[in-house]
Image (tube, grey):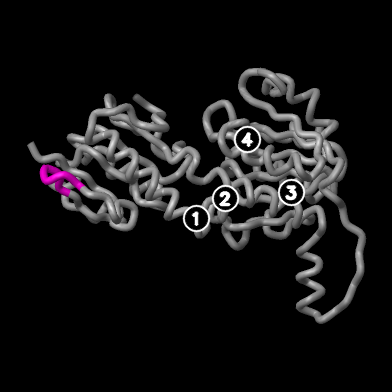
Amino acid sequence: MTRRIIAPEWVVQGFEFPADVEVTFNDDLPQLPDEVIASAQFIVIPYMQGPKAIQQSLPRMKNVEVIQLLTAGFDNIYPHMPVGVKLCNAGGVHDDSTSEMALTLALCALRDIPESVNLQTQKLWGHYFSHSLADKKVLLIGYGGVGKAIERRLIPFECDVIPVATNARDHVKAIEELPNLIPDADLIFLAVPLNDKTKGLVDQKFLSKMKPGALLINVARGPVVDTMALVEALNAGKIRAALDVTDPEPLPAEHPLWQAPNCLITPHLGGDTDIFEKRARRRIHGQLERWLTNAPLDCVIIN
């Protein structure tokens, strides 16, 4: 019996497929003929494939056994998954690069690097006061792979890090304790998955509890934050923000968040670095070896 796989060519490059495996290279699911996508048992979703394209393609996957993502996030596909199909994410592939982005945002905002860029464009030497990351109390909301990678990078900066997760354990606080933890935090990192419990987690009430001048860093998903409540808090001069994700995304040119003071925005760059392809290829090769030998898969979200 022939086994069929659909995947971007670059991610399976160098993998030695058995003779009974047929591979279709693809970077755009909607472009596949119905008979091709219907025949595949293992499908790797192309990186940055739009959510609408994914959702529209799912009903055409008549014989799929495994859907493998190249992202850590799975909120765009999880609610639409066919019954009985395994969903695997790319947990671990993006941890280091996303945590690096989180610290980059924090340091750039604290040291006001945008002001230096502005001065440089004007060829001005303007000395100014800024803030250090050292000695800051940090609230780290989300303690999965990215959250733990952020913590590892914060500790050498001599921060007091308080991780928060769904359940308390060891040095990790439970999410129910947030109302008592928010007011003391100098920095708040968001590294949670997007789901019903985290959507709108950072709302007007959350923001009102933040210490004046505290910095919110979001490398999770845009909808974890109530965008208009954040715009209001920023315009009031109460807090600062550094965002790699927004809601909506992409952020429209006319959106008021662009003009909000003390807000640094990057266009969802966290996981897209030079290490991504190597780590993604290693993950997919490993998953294919497991699937072809009937071994348990890694990072199974739905079994």
In the rendered image, which quarter is residue 258 located in? bottom right
The mark lying in front, picked from 3 and 1, is 1
The mark lying in front, picked from 3 and 2, is 2
Residue 97: give its label. 2
Which of the marked residues, 1 or 4, is nearer the chain's N terminus? 4
Residue where numbered disc 1 is placed:
275
Do the numbered discs 2 and 1 sit on residues whose CB atoms are within 8 Å? yes
Q: Amino acid at mark 2?
A: Ser
Packing grade of label 4 (10 A; few <14, some 14-19, many >=20) is some
Do the numbered discs 3 and 1 sit on residues whose CB atoms are within 8 Å? no
Q: Amino acid at mark 1?
A: Ile
Which of the marked residues, 2 or 1, is nearer the chain's N terminus? 2
Residue where numbered disc 3 is placed:
241
Residue 51 inside the magenta-drawn segment: no
What kind of element bears circle 4? Answer: helix
Q: Quarter of the image containing the C terminus?
A: top left
What kind of element bears circle 1? Answer: loop
Marks 1 and 4 sit apart, C-alpha to C-alpha, by 19 Å
Span highlighted in magenta in the image: 17-22
